[in-house]
Image (cartoon, rainbow, N blue to C red):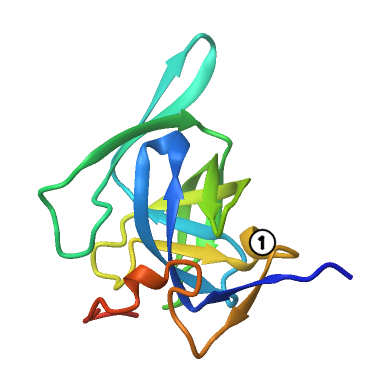
Amino acid sequence: MTELSPIGWREYIALPELNIPEIKAKIDTGARSSALHAFAIAEFERDGQTMVRFSVHPYQRDSDRVIVAEAILLDRRSVRSSSGASQLRPVIQTVVELGGQRWAIELTLTNRDEMGFRMLLGREAIRQRFLVDAGNSYIQNPQQQNQTDFNEE
């Protein structure tokens, strides 16, 4: 059996293909899929491929910083939120970087303005890669441990 690296219940990750060098993610083993806060989501065609363009506020409580990203639209899926409501969301595939590892994940796009985290990293994304230490934060990013976080999920 391979030794799994530990991660905390929240970690800073990067999404290099989306030009997001850092975003705070809640590691959510209760959620199957991963979700990214996105707004101004628009589908368009490029070279016969359906694409999606969207904007991201990578930092909570900071609406001045905006990153505009594009990706191939992989699918549209009905996802049930923690409140029990179903929502049809665009799905993309992108690379995530955490703890010196880089791998592709599927990511749903949704408005998470009212949530404490701009991103959820679900169990499918971390399966057979990490072991979650629910009592700790920023195990892979120890420099972030001294930051005070308010208003989190």
11 in relation to 90, above or below: below
Residue depicted at x 43% and y 73%: 138
- What residue does disc 1 label? 124
Count of numbered circles on the image? 1
| Residue 71 drawn at (x, y percent) | 46, 31
Horizontal side, residue 96 vs residue 129: left or right: left
| Residue 28 drawn at (x, y percent) | 53, 74
Dot 1 alpha-carbon crowd within 10 angstroms: few under 14, some 14 to 19, many 20 or more = some
Q: Residue furthest top?
A: 47
Front residue of 99 and 11: 99
Horizontal side, residue 29 vs residue 112: left or right: right
Q: Identify the image quadrant of residue 12.
A: bottom left
Label 1 element class: helix
| Residue 68 drawn at (x, y percent) | 28, 34
86 in relation to 65, above or below: below
Horizontal side, residue 89 vs residue 37: left or right: right
Front residue of 111 and 128: 128
Residue depicted at x 35% and y 56%: 23
Quadrant of the frame with the N terminus: bottom right
55 in relation to 64, above or below: above
Residue depicted at x 33% and y 68%: 117
| Residue 27 drawn at (x, y percent) | 51, 71
Q: What's under tag 1, amino acid-wise?
A: Glu
Quadrant of the frame with the C terminus: bottom left
Q: Residue furthest front?
A: 143
